[in-house]
Image (tube, coloured by chain):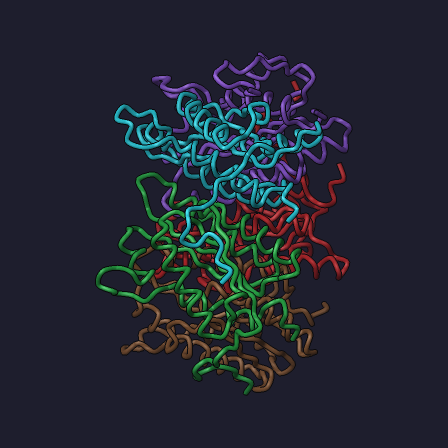
Chain colours: A purple, B cyan, C green, D brown, E red
Amino acid sequence: MAVKGLGQIDQQYDGSKLRIGIIHARWNRVIIDALVKGAIERMRELGVKEENIIVETVPGSYELPWGTKRFVDRQKKMGEPLDAVIPIGVLIKGSTMHFEYISDSTTHALMKLQNQVQLPVIFGLLTCLTEEQAFARAGIDEGHTMHNHGEDWGAAAVEMSVKFGPNNDF
Amino acid sequence: MAVKGLGQIDQQYDGSKLRIGIIHARWNRVIIDALVKGAIERMRELGVKEENIIVETVPGSYELPWGTKRFVDRQKKMGEPLDAVIPIGVLIKGSTMHFEYISDSTTHALMKLQNQVQLPVIFGLLTCLTEEQAFARAGIDEGHTMHNHGEDWGAAAVEMSVKFGPNNDF
Amino acid sequence: MAVKGLGQIDQQYDGSKLRIGIIHARWNRVIIDALVKGAIERMRELGVKEENIIVETVPGSYELPWGTKRFVDRQKKMGEPLDAVIPIGVLIKGSTMHFEYISDSTTHALMKLQNQVQLPVIFGLLTCLTEEQAFARAGIDEGHTMHNHGEDWGAAAVEMSVKFGPNNDF
Amino acid sequence: MAVKGLGQIDQQYDGSKLRIGIIHARWNRVIIDALVKGAIERMRELGVKEENIIVETVPGSYELPWGTKRFVDRQKKMGEPLDAVIPIGVLIKGSTMHFEYISDSTTHALMKLQNQVQLPVIFGLLTCLTEEQAFARAGIDEGHTMHNHGEDWGAAAVEMSVKFGPNNDF
Amino acid sequence: MAVKGLGQIDQQYDGSKLRIGIIHARWNRVIIDALVKGAIERMRELGVKEENIIVETVPGSYELPWGTKRFVDRQKKMGEPLDAVIPIGVLIKGSTMHFEYISDSTTHALMKLQNQVQLPVIFGLLTCLTEEQAFARAGIDEGHTMHNHGEDWGAAAVEMSVKFGPNNDF
């Protein structure tokens, strides 16, 4: 049976020929920086070269979808096209409904963006009910209760680029 | 009256000429594997040939829509086009709102994908509030309280391919 | 003032020249059958001919949008185009979030489908919190507390076809 | 500074050259009729001529988006194009989730419709938790606790037509 | 490593060559006016010229997406195209579900609008549960507990225009 990957440890991916973009919001900066660092380190481990990881920023998470689109376009125009992009933002529930509407609209927009930019867009948005939850998911809470989720995003960017990126012509 | 199927047991479908794709996330792997197995066994029972069931993976459920699109494109390009595809993922409620935003955006994206790939896309996403619920729906909880939902997805893939697949030229 | 219909009983519609499709899921079959029957009887009362009511099925409600699209396409290709279509499904709240995600994505997809198929698509989805609610809305609960909602859908299909169907060239 | 309207009472709009459509559902008819009347009276006060207010109906609120689209198309085809349209419906929370799914899908569809019909579509949907709330918002509750919201919709239709309607060629 | 902006204070942006639009609803006018003022002052500080800030209004927040689209089109047609636009509205939870449906549909529509108008659209919608929350976020509550959020929107408009605006040809 043509069951690839079923019941096996998924293969090691080679990132040495990939160019990956990270675009992050700047709210909750300490958390964001840890997540970005985690993503970069994981990609480096998977062979992505330092000069092939491009980082850009936007003010807040709502700006991520449009910013990502234009960031991807720019890299293409500059002759340095991306294989995948990781938009990163940290949203924390406040007393108004701002959190819910931003989280919802941004998540849907990033999902749809993949069809526009024809690249894997990795979901690097933390949607937390408390600041503590966000610290934990960036691997920087006091008790180190969780791993840095940026690492998962870095690994996902490499895998999705290799399997389903624009330079995979099948 | 031209009432097809009304009040009758729906017909037996012949899967012997179909090629069906399964693409699954790798989080909650034990549950996923049981669901994939259930889908495959049911399709085999309905006559789908072993070599015509193609399995692919993505890291997490959010990657399913884009991964499915590219998986379908690849099979087409390779001259082995699919008649239907079953994206499979298991999402379990955590303490942040991650579950809600991933579930919502992925469900909508898989629904819309049908218009892009012009294939039936069977909804193989479990959106559970507890791990126990997910085990039960994969038919692998201790008490065997429920059947393996992967079987339903396999049957749906065969029926939808026969009735509404791309090779059904009417 | 050109106020059509305002304050008057809406007119009697003549369904004698219409061809209407019903496509229903097969979960909760007793309820579904009652709803389909209600829709058919109401359309017959409004003059739709027996041979012009075409019934098709899909496994579950999530399959309705794609199934409806292909069903409409098939009728067109066969030279027997529909004037309206009524997708019918019964969704009942369970212990996971399956109900919410299926209901939401299916409702939106059926709404959008109207622009794709250029036909009125009548909303025949019951989204109930209990089985009792669904029985009542199909007119088959013990106390006969409510009318069969399928009748409303049949009437809406006829009215919308006459007013806003594809054969109404204005 | 080119700050139009900031801190000033917004200007008086002249509706004398506008043609406005109203399309309303027929559920909760007493409330609907009051809202339609409020919208018409307000538009008349702003100079819209009696013969230039066209009223059409659909069975329920879910039918509003498709009905509105076809209504707009028909007026155009008849050589009597609309400058704006006000779909009006009254949705009241019941015991199932019908209210939520209809309200949500209809609101989004009416919003998107503006891009399809290239007209201002005024949001005339009441989404109430009780019948009393709906009576109050139509200005017909016993205590006359609120004004008729149809008046706001009529005023919005005139303003949006003048500022952003299809006959405003800038 | 090509890590722009990571760990550094984001750069100072020069707004002197930008033309920015503000379009605001007129409900909750005192709050709106404060937000608009905050946005304008911040843009002036970043060098945007008085004559290059254009302000327009719509009746309510639901009118923002269509109004913004036409406002952008008009400025383009007049030979005075915008580099970014800030739609501003204040929504406050009432006793019906009006707040939820307007907030949700408007947020998604403004997000999508960016692809239609090919401009950064800054999210200037307050979605508050109480009036007090809105006063605080406009910097005009008695205790001055929060800063004027309009300032953030003004800064975001300038940054997004410089980085990702239509006149940034890369």
Task: Write the residue at 43% across / 32% down.
Answer: B151
Q: Nearer the viewer, residue E50 or A54?
A: A54
Q: Nearer the viewer, residue A166 or C46?
A: C46
In the image, is E23 to the left or to the right of C143?
right
- From the top left corner, tell me how far across and down residue A70 is, in percent: 67, 38
Q: To which quarter of the image does residue C150 belong?
A: bottom left
Task: Write the residue at 68% across / 27% down.
Answer: A82
In the image, is B136 to the left or to the right of E85?
left
Q: To which quarter of the image does residue D50 belong?
A: bottom right
Asked whether residue E7 appears in the rendered view, the answer is no
Number of marks present in the image shown: 0
Q: Nearer the viewer, residue C19 or A118?
A: C19
- From the top left corner, tell me how far across and down residue C64 is, in percent: 49, 50
Q: Identify the image quadrant of the C terminus of chain D.
A: bottom right
Q: Nearer the viewer, residue D76 or E12?
A: D76
- From the top left corner, tell me how far across and down residue D92 is, in percent: 35, 64
Which residue is most to the left? C143
**E53 shown above or below C102:** below
Q: Identify the image quadrant of the N terminus of chain D.
A: bottom right
Task: Write the residue at 27% across / 77% down.
Answer: D143
**D91 shown above or below D145:** above
- From the top left corner, tell me how far across and down residue E92 is, in percent: 40, 57
In the image, is D167 to the left or to the right of E151?
right
Task: Write the residue at 55% across / 50% down.
Answer: E39
**E26 shown above or below E124:** below
Asked whether residue C32 appears in the rendered view, the answer is yes
**E44 shown above or below E57:** above
